[in-house]
Amino acid sequence: MNSQTILKLLRDHWGYDEFRPKQEAIISAIIAGSDAAVVMPTGGGKSLCYQLPAVALGKTALVVSPLLSLMQDQVVQLKDFGVPAASLSSMLTQEEQSQVIRSARRGDYRLLYLSPERLAREDTLAWLRHLPLSFFAIDEAHCISEWGHEFRPEYRQLSRLRSEFPDLPIAAFTASATRRVRHDILEQLHLRSPHTSISSFFRPNLRYTVRACRSAEQEQLLVEALSAHRRDSVIVYAPTIARVEETVDFLAGNGISALPYHGKMESAARRRHQAQWMSDEVCVLVGTLAFGMGINKPSVRAVVHLSLPKSIEQYYQEAGRAGRDGLAADCVLLWRKQDAGLLAHFIGEIGDGLERERAWDRYHRVRRFAEAPQCRHKQICLYFGETPKWDACGACDVCLGQPEWLAANAGATPRRLAAHAAATPRSAPGSVQTKGTIDRETRAEDAELLEYLRQWRREMAAARGVPAFVILHDTSLADLCRKRPRSAQQLETVYGIGRAKRESLGEPLLSALAAFDSGARAQIREAPAASPAEQTRAMLAEGMSFSEIAAARGRRLNTVITQVADMVEKGTLEFDPRWVGEDVRAAIEQLALRLGTDRLKPIKEELPPEVDYPEIRLVVSALRRTDGNKGSPTD
C-alpha cells in the first residue's frame, strides 16, 4: 500500500494532513505484516499506529488493553471517525457480548478490544480462531514485565498468541519502558525481527515544576496553580483517599469547583464524576492513583501531584496525561518530605527481598529527580536510556525558572493569572517541533469565540452522551477560531475534522459559528454553591449526626470530623460536648494537659483502644482553640 493511500485514510477518517514523527514508518511496517515494538510517549499518537493499519487491511485487528475506560473511549471515538469498532467486556450483558461475537465473526469490525484476562480464556481463543484477524496490538505492553512499574501477571498469558496464531503479526505499544523492560517485552511476546521504534522521551510542550513544601504552603500553591489554569482541564493527584476529600473541600472553600475520585466511592459515583470531568462540566478532578489509567483526554492543561510518586515511570506516565494534544501544559510536583518518609516506611515493610530492592531503587531515583538541581527533562530521558544532545531543555523550572504563579508570594490572595503559553522550548538545542501541531496559543481576540465553542461542545457532548473530546479536540477548536469557516468546503481545512465528522457535525457547527457572528456568547456559569464548611455547619445546625452528614455529602466519616475539628480550632464553630462522651472527653483533656496537644499519637497510646483519633481530634481542637495555639495537631 503506497503512501498516498495511507495519507488519504488519515485525512478522510482523522482529519490530519500529515503524520507525527515515526508514525508512518510504524504503520507501513504493520501493514506489510511485520511484528512491531513501539515505545512512544503519551500524546505521541500510539493509537493511530494500530488503528489506521486496521482500517487499511480491511480485516479485524484485535487490541489487548487492561483498561475498560480506554476501550470504551476509543470505540466511541473510532465510530465518530467512521471506523467500525467494538469492545468486549464485563460492562456488557451476556446478550450484548454474544452480539459482539456474532458481528466479529462476520468481520463487521476493523478493531475489537479485549482485556488480557478475557483473551487468556480457552473459550475466547476458540471463537477467535473463526475471526478474519489481521494482527494483534498489545497496548500498555510494559505490564508484561516484572521490571516494569505496573506488572500485571495476566499479561504473561499473552505469550500464547505466537503459538496459537503463528501467522499473525504482533505489535506491542508502550509509553514508558526502560531498556530492561523493552527487552522483556520482546522476549515474552516472542516478537520476530520486529520493526522497532523508540521515540524520544522528551516532551517539549510539558513544563516540569518541582517544589518541596510544607503543608500550608502546599495548599496555597495548589490554589495558585489552579488559579493560573482557571478555565482549563486539570488533574490533581493526592496520595490517600482522605487527602482527596480534604483537597476537594479545601478547594471549594477557595472558590474552585472540583470532583473527587477514589476507590472507596461507589462505582456509579466514580463513573459520574469521570463523565462530568471528561465533558468539561467541571474542570478539576482530584483523585488517587486509581484515576487516570487509560484516560484519553487530550486537552488536560495541568497535572498536579501532592506527594512524591513511587517511581519515575509512574510520574512520567501520570504527568504525561497533560498536553496530549501537543499544546503547552504544566506538570507540577508539590511534595512534602513527611509524605516521602511515609513512602520509605512502606517500602521497608515489603516482605519480598527482590521486590523491596526494586522499590528502594525506584524511590532513590525519584527522590533524586525531585531534589537534584538538574534539568528535569534530561533526568527523565537518561532514566529511560536516552542520552540527549542538549544540556538545557528550556521547559522546566531548573532551566527556565519558576512559573509566575510559583515565583509570586504564595501567601497572597490567589491571582487569576493567564496560563503560560510558551512551554515549548525555542532555544533548546535538542528541541523538535511536532509536525502537524498548530499554534500553541489562541489570539486574544478569539478568546470569546473559543469559550463559546467550548460551551457548544459541552452541550453537544451531553446531547450525544460522549466525552467532550470525542466531539472536537482543543486543537480543532483553536483552528476554528483562526479560520472561521463559513461552508462545508472550508471545514475541510480545519485540523482534526475528517469526512465523518463533517457529515455528523458540519451543519450544527456552522450554525454555531453563524450564531456567534450574530451576537451569541457563552453563558456565564452559575456562582458556586455554599462552601463545604458552610454545608457541614448548616447540617449540624439542623441536628444531623456526623454519619448523616457524611452520607449526605458523599464523604467519609473521618473527613467530616476532621472538617468540624478544623472549624472548632479556627473559632468558626463552637464545640458541642455531645459529640464526645463525658468520660472519654475528660480522659482526653487530662492526657492533653500532661502530654501536650501538638501530636495525637501519644494521647492515643494512653487511651483504651476503642477511643479513636476522630474523638481525640475533636477534643484537642477545642483545647487548642482555648489555648490560642495555631496549626492542626498531627497523628
Image (tube, helix red, strand yellow):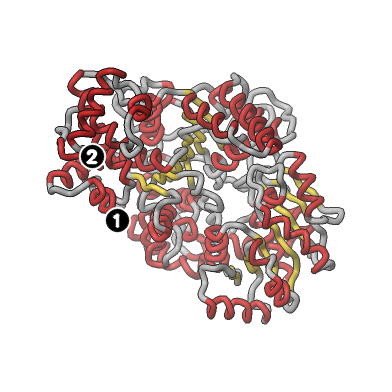
Determine the residue located farthest toward the left in the rendered image: 542
Query: Compared with residue 544, is residue 419 higher up or lower down, i.e. above or below?
Result: above
Q: Does residue 299 appear left or right of residue 544 in this picture?
A: right
Res. 104 image quadrant: bottom right
Q: In this view of the protein, can residue 426 be seen by the observer?
A: no
Q: Does residue 535 appear left or right of residue 346 in this picture?
A: left
Q: Which residue is mark 2?
A: 533
Secondary structure found at label 1: loop
Type of amino acid at the residue the image marks with label 2: Ala
Seen at 33% across and 33% down, the residue is 416
| Quadrant including the C terminus | top left
Mark 2 vs mark 1, CA separation in Å = 37 Å
Observer-nearest of 107 and 384: 384
Seen at 76% across and 39% down, the residue is 179
| Quadrant including the N terminus | bottom right
Query: Compared with residue 227, is residue 193 higher up or lower down, i.e. above or below?
Result: below
Going from the N terminus, do you reach mark 2 or mark 1 first?
1
Seen at 62% across and 62% down, the residue is 115
Observer-nearest of 301 and 309: 309
Observer-nearest of 19 and 290: 290
Question: Of the numbered discs in the image, which one, if any, rests on residue 302?
Answer: none
Q: Does residue 434 appear left or right of residue 222 in this picture?
A: right
Q: In this view of the protein, can residue 139 be seen by the observer?
A: yes
Q: Position of residue 468 (x, y in %)?
A: 44, 57
Q: Position of residue 183 (x, y in %)?
A: 79, 45
Query: Compared with residue 314, is residue 132 higher up or lower down, i.e. above or below?
Result: below
Q: Which residue is mark 1?
A: 520
Res. 256 image quadrant: top left
Type of amino acid at the residue the image marks with label 1: Ala
Query: Compared with residue 633, is residue 92 higher up or lower down, i.e. above or below?
Result: below
| Mark 2 or 1, closer to the camera | 2
